[in-house]
Image: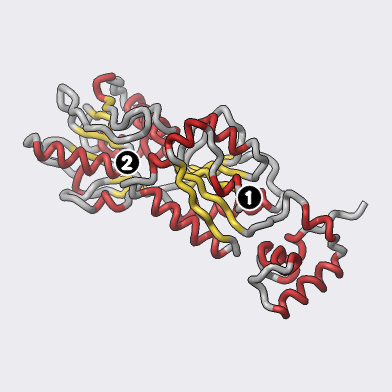
Amino acid sequence: MNKKVRMADIADKLGISVVSVSKGLSGKPGVSPEMREKIIATAKELGYTVETVQSASEPVSGNIGILVSQRFAGDNAFYPNLYCQVLVMCNQAGYSGILEIVPLEAEYSQTLPNIVQGKKVDGIIFLGELDRMYLRKVIATGLPYIMMDFYDDAISCDCVISDNTSGGFQITNHLIQTGRRDICFVGSIRATSSIMDRYLGYTKALLRAGIPIRPEYQVEDRDEDGVFIPLKLPQPMPQAFVCNCDEIAYNLVELLKRQGYRVPEDVAVAGYDDFRFAQLGIPNLTSYRVNVEDMSRIAVDRIIQKIEGAAATACSFITRGKLVIRDSTKI
C-alpha cells in the first residue's frame, strides 16, 4: 500500500514551510502566483489528494496558540521574554503565534479560550502552569498541544522544561561551597512543578552535604492563586537564601536592606532565571540562567511536528542552563 502523501512532503520537496503549502493549495493569500503554481504542480506529481486538505493533522490557520495564565502575565519578567522567543521561533518556521491570557475566573470555570472556540489555531502551547481541569477541557478539543516550562504527572503529554532540579542543586551547592550551611529556600513549593523541582534540587544538595532539612527554612512567596505575598524573614536568620526566581530574590534583598542586613556580608541571596531582576539591584544576583532560546526552539519544533501528524509518543525535553555567580553570594 502506498504511503499517504502529506503537505509536509510537498514542503520538503520545495524547501518551503507547511503553512505556505497549505495557503497555496487552499487559495489563501500569502504566497506568490508562481509559488502557488509550483505547489499545485508538486502536489499532483506526488499524488496528493484533495481529501488530505481536510485532515485534522494538516495545518488550517497557520497559527500556533500560546495560552498563559493571568497570574504569570502581570509584572512577571520571565514569561514575556519566553513568549517573545516563542514568537521568533514560530515566525522562522512559517507560523504565526497568537497569545491569549487566560483570566483566573475563566481558568477556574473552565471556559475555553477564544482562539480555541473560534478555531483560530492549529495547535496549543500551554505556557506555564494552568489549572488541571482547565487543561483537560482544552485538551479534549483534540488540538495538538504541549506544555512549556511545566509538566503535570497526571497528564501524559509532551513538555519542554528547564533542568530545574539540577539548577536548584547547583545554586545550593555553590552556597555550601562558600561555607554557608544554614540555607533557606524561598518559594511556595506546591505552586508550580518548576518551583517544586527547584526545591528538590535544594534539598538534594543539603542531603548530600549532610545538612538537615529545617522546616523553618522554607518561606512562602505566593498565595493559592499564584499572586506574590509579602515575604516573612525566618528565625533564626539563615546564612543564605535560595529563591525560586530572580524577582523574589530582588524583593528579598530590598527587604533585608530595610531590616539592616548586608548582602552578601551578613547573608547571601541567589535567584533563578537570570533575567531582568538579576542585574537590576545592588548587589547583582547570583542566578541560574534558563536557556530560553533552546526551550522555545524545541517547543515550536515539537508542536509543529504534532500539527503535521507526527510525534505521537509523549516526550519530555529538558534544557540545560548555567550557574552565573555574581556579588550577592560572594564571600
Name of the residue lying farthest toward the right: 1
Element carrying mark 1? loop
Q: Residue at x 56, y 60 (%)?
A: 96
Q: Which of 67 and 308 is in front in this view?
A: 67
Tell me if residue 202 comes above or below residue 309 in the rendering.
above
The disc labelled 2 sits on which kind of residue? Cys
Mark 2, residue position = 245
**Quarter placement of the C terminus:** top left
Q: Residue 24 in the image: state x and y as whole percent.
A: 72, 69
Q: Which amino acid does label 1 sit on?
A: Lys
Residue denoted by label 1: 119
Q: Residues within 10 Å of mark 1 (few under 14, many from 20)?
A: few
- As drawn, the residue found furthest toward the bottom would be 34
Image x and y of residue 326, in percent: 23, 49
Q: Which one is earlier in the sequence, the residue at label 2 or at label 1?
A: 1
Question: What residue is rendered at 52% in x and 60% in y?
Answer: 89
- Give the percent coordinates (x, y) of residue 65: 55, 51
Instruction: Say whether residue 71 is left or right of residue 113.
Output: left
**Label 2: how many Cα within 10 Å (few below 14, some 14–19, many 20+):** many
Q: Which residue is drawn at 61% across and 33% down?
A: 156
Q: Is residue 256 visible?
A: yes
User: Which residue is painted at 15% across and 22% down in the image?
Assistant: 236
Displayed quadrant of residue 139: top right
Image mark for residue 90 = none
- Determine which quarter of the picture holds residue 265: top left
Query: Which numbered disc, 2 or 1, marks the residue closer to the eye?
Result: 1
Q: Where is residue 106 in the image (x, y as percent from the top left)?
A: 48, 36
